[in-house]
Image (tube, rainbow, N blue to C red):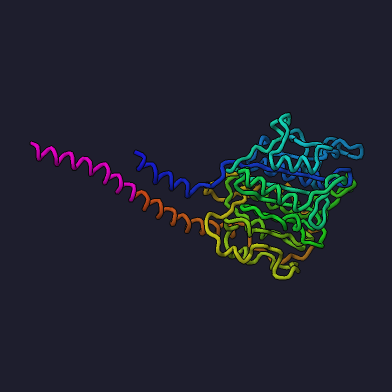
Amino acid sequence: MLLWLYPLFLASYAYGSQHTNNWAVLVSSSRYWFNYRHMSNALGMYRTVKRLGIPDSNIILMLADDVACNARNKFPGSVYANPGRHLDLYGENIEVDYRGYEVTVENFLRLLTGRLDDSVPRSKRLLTDSKSNIFIYLTGHGGNEFLKFQDNEEISAHDIADAFHQMYEGGRYNEIFFMADTCQANSMFSKFYSPNVLATGSSVVGENSYSHENDFDVGVAVIDSYTHYVLEYMEHVNKTSRLTMADLFTSYDVPKIGSHPGVRSDLFPRPLGPQHPMDQYGRGQGWTVEGGGEWRGRDGEAYKRGREALITDFFGGVVSVDVEDEFGEELLFPPAPEEKTKPSPKPLPSARSASDSSASSQLSSSVDVFTQAYLTLFFGLLISIVFKGGYSWRSRSKGLVEG
């Protein structure tokens, strides 16, 4: 009986993902009214991961939370990410897990490594395991290899790298996707050394990240440029989308963002997506970084094999669902009005064409999987015949001789 089940198990293993659950850790490390946009950044990501299927029980949200009820807020109890104020990101359905002065470097590192006191409630714990994919998003004020926490302390790139290694040694993740939106953000993942980590940031070393636009009624900038365009792209993603991480990365538009985002994939074993669009990463209009953008791992990407990394592997956890992606009817993070008059940059590969290329690659890999499953099934049947059929044949032969 077990011989018949083995080929089915192998086939399901080949098709499925190595992860069984998704988590998100979203951190706004700033406080004070003039950092309104950092809270909007984190809340925008919070809304997106919830929409794509990660429940509140699997989201850790760290905020100073001093904006919605600030005396300067003309719209009490609300936080908006665009001047039109079409969507209240604060609303009634958010769960802030670490609030105010709880947002510290120590609490963040203890959260990642699981080194928490027994009195810490379940809602403040990252209850991940070796089958967990984790999306970690940081936003705030930073510099070369550091991020400030509430203008009081700093976390270094070494601190995060060592925390990730402790997580790896402790079997606390399957894959990590790290994203940072801060000045010189790419330096924050420069010290990583643990496997299965994919990272991206908003700006190279020596470069600032900028706010997107101001709301004159609110009186401050309401969202950062890099996060705005990431969220705008994510509005085209749903729970069953086949868009890859390559599609996300190649959507970066330097003239719009105002800085040079970076990617690090040398620690990540799976291909980011179709080779053709990723070959063009960092080579479009506005990219001035030598070598075609900052992508650490570019040379090794062509040698990677296996299932391509989907956006939903980190933002929603829906796996092995081959359904055509659907696009939302209305963008909740639309371009600013003044952008409509800007000259159009050199078009990047469209999300849909990249998705089609991804589908073709998936079909090719599916043929290999079918072949492997068929051969395994064949040998399973052969072994079954030898052990079961052979025994029956000897029994019948013996009976004929004795009769």
User: Can the viewer see residue 316?
Assistant: no
Q: Is residue 295 above or below residue 105?
A: below
> Left of 90 or right of it: where is 172?
left
The quarter of the picture where the C terminus appears is top left
Residue toward you, 38 or 132: 132
> Which residue appears at 67% of the width and 34% of the height?
57
> Which residue appears at 61% of the width and 49% of the height?
175
Q: Position of residue 348 (x, y in %)?
A: 67, 63
The quarter of the picture where the N terminus appears is top left
> Left of 171 or right of it: where is 163?
right
In the rendered image, the residue lying farthest to the bottom is: 290
> Left of 360 or right of it: where is 202?
right
Magenta stretch: dominant secondary structure: helix
Q: Is residue 344 above or below residue 225?
A: below
In the rendered image, the residue lying farthest to the right is: 72
Q: Position of residue 207 (x, y in %)?
A: 81, 61
In the rendered image, the residue lying farthest to the top is: 119
Q: How many marks?
A: 0
Q: Is residue 88 above or below residue 292?
A: above
Bounds of the magenta span?
A: 379-403
Magenta stretch holds residue 400: yes
> Which residue appears at 86% of the width and 35% of the height?
69
Tell me where residue 283 sits by quadrant.
Answer: bottom right
In the rendered image, the residue lying farthest to the left is: 403
> Which residue appears at 87% of the width and 46% of the height?
151
Q: Position of residue 27 (x, y in %)?
A: 76, 44
